[in-house]
Image (spheres, rainbow, N blue to C red):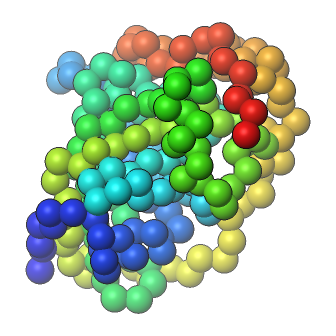
Amino acid sequence: MGKVYERIDGRLRAFIEAQHIFFTATAPLDGDGTVNLSPKGLAGSFAVIDELTVAYLDFAGSNAETIAHLRENGRITLMWCAFEGPPNIVRVHGRGEPVFRDDPRWAALIEHFPGIDPTPHGLRAIIVVTADLVRDSCGYAVPFMTYDEDRPVHKSRFARETDESLDAYFRKKEHIASSIDGLPGLPLPLPPLPAS
């Protein structure tokens, strides 16, 4: 059944990298605060940096709960489950950090995502997660589902935005600069996307 892993490598890494979707879970420190669970996709937007570090691209959206929670306390769990092939669920429990566009680490981190052009997606941050605990479980109750393709809607929606109009879009949204619970979210004004 379940097993704990010391590192993300071999078959475990191959399984994670083969999945088309994963989920992130975060929460504020306040016990009455809002727990957030988000699906993440888009081919090429996830990378294993090393045996204990993973990262994913955080694109434009209607809120910034994950960013707000990570800025407050850093706790995050990532989960992948097999919808095809043998049943399996993998969780990485760890500490996460949003790396914003004006961070000096940005240029080195973005190189881990050569398979995706971040420009048309309104890239806001790179979320870097250091694993504290890596484990799997059976996944026997997860249904079979078939992946067809990524939806083109996100790209077509945000491709028409400039950095300036994206910043204006974020300012109009209630839960971008601050979370549902009032925690600091995405820092605005949005810094320009660095030239690649």
130 versus 49 height, above or below: above
Where does the image place residue 98, in percent across and percent down from the top left?
Answer: 44, 30
Point 48% across, 57% down: residue: 47
Q: Is residue 37 in sight in this rendering?
A: no
Point 33% across, 50% down: residue: 53
Residue closer to the observer: 180 or 166:
166
Where does the image place residue 30, in percent across and percent down from the top left?
Answer: 21, 19
Point 16% across, 53% down: residue: 133
Q: Which quarter shows the N terminus? A: bottom left
Q: Could you tell whether 141 is left or right of 56 in the image? A: left
Where does the image place residue 81, in percent across and percent down from the top left?
Answer: 36, 70
Task: Count up the numbered dots.
Answer: 0
131 versus 144 height, above or below: above
Write down the quadrant of residue 129 in the picture.
top left
Write down the quadrant of residue 121 in the picture.
top right
Point 58% across, 44% down: residue: 110
Where does the image place residue 155, in percent across and percent down from the top left?
Answer: 77, 48
Q: Which quarter shows the C terminus? A: top right
Q: Could you tell whether 134 is left or right of 183 in the image? A: left
Q: Is residue 182 in sight in this rendering?
A: yes
Q: Could you tell whether 136 is left or right of 76 in the image? A: left
90 versus 155 height, above or below: below
Residue closer to the observer: 131 or 114:
114
Residue found at the very far bottom of the displayed protein: 85
80 versus 85 height, above or below: above
Write down the quadrant of residue 147 in the picture.
bottom right
Residue closer to the observer: 137 or 6:
6
